[in-house]
């Protein structure tokens, strides 16, 4: 076997090993997972104690939400940078705040303000792929009282082609495959073994544009970042 042949074989074996490790990890993480199909009309609440997406947006490793204040999304309806000197630690990660009042609010009820899915892109979790963070302008949405972040505005747009269905799928895959796992391993597995409803960015963009033209997006561009709870 040539050197190049041996190198290719090594790469193939490495990829197979990584996928095998991911599959084994997911099998273990799925023990006790809710027996609910991803398109079922209701999903149980997702645990929110890891893994976490940190260190994005130029902030140091371990900092959540690209350094933005988790409380400000709710109180100011805006992505507000936190003060590096005003922090709180929870679940082994760091949260920054713009004021002492916001820090105190978070510490009284962190579950209320934490982003869903550990701060990973919600549209990625819709495909069982924990990758990408968010929290800056146009990369977040408060939907029915909970904070969701996205890897970019386009990711948010694509998620909102069918918000309710994608939320159900994201909560399913977080519960069944992602929560409590190594995000890198889980991501590698699902980048190879796609979920059944996977669609390309081009297909999603075409659908989003058609819905926008028809005025039928769940949240039309230019509307408020905060979508109220039903009946509110």
Image (spheres, rainbow, N blue to C red):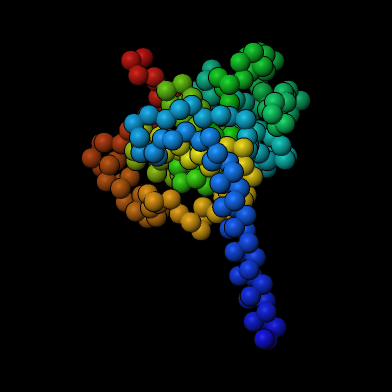
Determine whether 130 is above or below 86 in the image. below
Q: State the residue at coordinates (58%, 58%).
A: 19
Q: State the residue at coordinates (63%, 61%).
A: 17
Determine whether 209 is above or below 4 in the image. above
Residue 139 visible from this viewpoint: no
Q: State the residue at coordinates (62%, 26%).
A: 69
Instruction: Please state which of residues 65 and 221 is positioned toward the viewer in this rendering.
Output: 65
Instruction: Please state which of residues 191 and 99 is positioned toward the viewer in this rendering.
Output: 191
Instruction: Please state which of residues 127 and 33 is positioned toward the viewer in this rendering.
Output: 33
Residue 27 visible from this viewpoint: yes
Q: Position of residue 188 (x, y in %)?
A: 57, 54
Q: Residue furthest toward the left?
A: 214
Determine whether 223 is above or below 169 in the image. above
Q: Where is residue 1 in the image (x, y as percent from the top left)?
A: 67, 86
Q: Where is residue 184 in the image (x, y as percent from the top left)?
A: 62, 49
Give the quarter of the image for residue 165: top left
Is residue 80 toward the left or the right of residue 77 in the image? Answer: right
């Amino acid at each position: 076997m040539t050197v190049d042949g041996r190198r290719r074989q090594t790469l193939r074996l490495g990829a197979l090993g990584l996928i095998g490790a991911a599959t084994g990890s997911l099998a273990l993480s799925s023990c006790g997972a809710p027996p609910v199909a991803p398109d079922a009309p209701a999903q149980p609440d997702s645990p929110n104690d890891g893994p976490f997406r940190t260190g994005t947006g130029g902030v140091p490793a371990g900092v959540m939400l690209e350094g933005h204040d988790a409380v400000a999304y709710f109180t100011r309806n805006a992505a507000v940078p936190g003060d590096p000197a005003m922090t709180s630690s929870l679940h082994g990660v760091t949260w920054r705040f713009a004021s002492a009042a916001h820090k105190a609010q978070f510490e009284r009820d962190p579950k209320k303000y934490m982003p869903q899915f550990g701060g990973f892109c919600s549209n990625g979790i819709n495909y069982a792929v924990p990758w990408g963070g968010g929290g800056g302008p146009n990369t977040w949405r408060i939907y029915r009282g909970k904070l969701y972040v996205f890897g970019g505005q386009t990711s948010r747009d694509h998620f909102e082609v069918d918000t309710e269905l994608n939320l159900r799928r994201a909560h399913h895959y977080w519960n069944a495959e992602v929560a409590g796992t190594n995000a890198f391993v889980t991501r590698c597995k699902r980048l190879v073994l796609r979920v059944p409803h996977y669609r390309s960015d081009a297909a999603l963009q075409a659908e989003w544009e058609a819905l926008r033209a028809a005025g039928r997006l769940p949240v039309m561009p230019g509307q408020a970042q905060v979508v109220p709870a039903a009946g509110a």
